[in-house]
Amino acid sequence: MNGKLLRWLGLAVRLGLAAVWLYAGASKVGDLAASGRAVHAYQVLPYDVSVVVGAVLPFVELALGVLLLLGLATRLAAGFSAALLLVFIAGIVSAWSRGLAIDCGCFGSGGELPAGQSPSYLPEILRDVGFLALAGFLLIWPRTAVSLDGVLTGEPVEDNDE
């Protein structure tokens, strides 16, 4: 794959992952208490720690989204994205393996599901693995078209690769 095509594909990947983080953070930032309850539903952390993690998480997601949207510190943002996605995947696998019936809370308040509702863990895991693949792409090829990284390093928006 030539460099020019790779940079434009990278832009699409970067913007896609940015949209995921911006949507995830925005869907939780209005109700930080619900975000804390969603984290606590995994039954991994003590309640007080869950509340703090739940309150901080939307802002971390928004920050990652903004960095990726701007193309600033792309490799670093991709690395944090990959780490966070691995934690999310491990949490969902843990909840599934322990028989918990929860909504992951990835794009909203989450928490324990009402009686009679079944969790959808496999699609959530597969979705997050897809997002992890996007982060992995950016870890390997962080230089994308139309990015502040490129402006700051003096790279042209378009290169002359054939």
Image (tube, grey):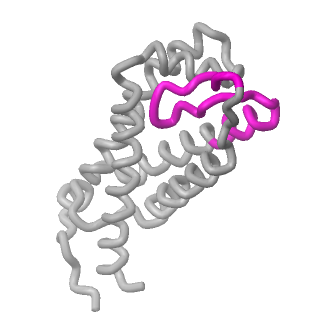
Residue 21 to residue 162: above or below: above
Which residue is farthest bottom? Answer: 162
Measured as percent of width and height from the top left, residue 47 is found at: 62, 9
Q: On the rendered image, what quadrant is the C terminus found in?
A: bottom left
**Going 67% across and 25% down the picture, which residue do you hit?**
42
Q: Give the quadrant of residue 13.
A: bottom left
Which residue is more in the foreground, 147 or 97? 97
Residue 35 to residue 86: above or below: above
Measured as percent of width and height from the top left, residue 54 is found at: 50, 20
**Going 60% across and 38% down the picture, which residue do you hit?**
88
Measured as percent of width and height from the top left, residue 18 is found at: 35, 49
Q: Give the quadrant of residue 63.
A: top left
Which residue is farthest right? Answer: 98
**Residue 125 belongs to the span the image colors magenta:** no
Measured as percent of width and height from the top left, residue 73 is found at: 34, 49
Q: On the rendered image, what quadrant is the N terminus found in?
A: bottom left
**Going 44% across and 22% down the picture, which residue do you hit?**
56
**Residue 103 belongs to the span the image colors magenta:** yes
Question: Seen in the image, is 57 located left or right of residue 45?
Answer: left
> Which range is magenta?
89-115
Which residue is more in the foreground, 3 or 124? 124
**Going 34% across and 35% down the picture, which residue do you hit?**
62
Which residue is more in the foreground, 127 or 3? 127
Question: Seen in the image, is 21 located left or right of residue 71?
Answer: right
Question: Seen in the image, is 76 located left or right of residue 83?
Answer: left
Question: Seen in the image, is 109 located left or right of residue 30?
Answer: right
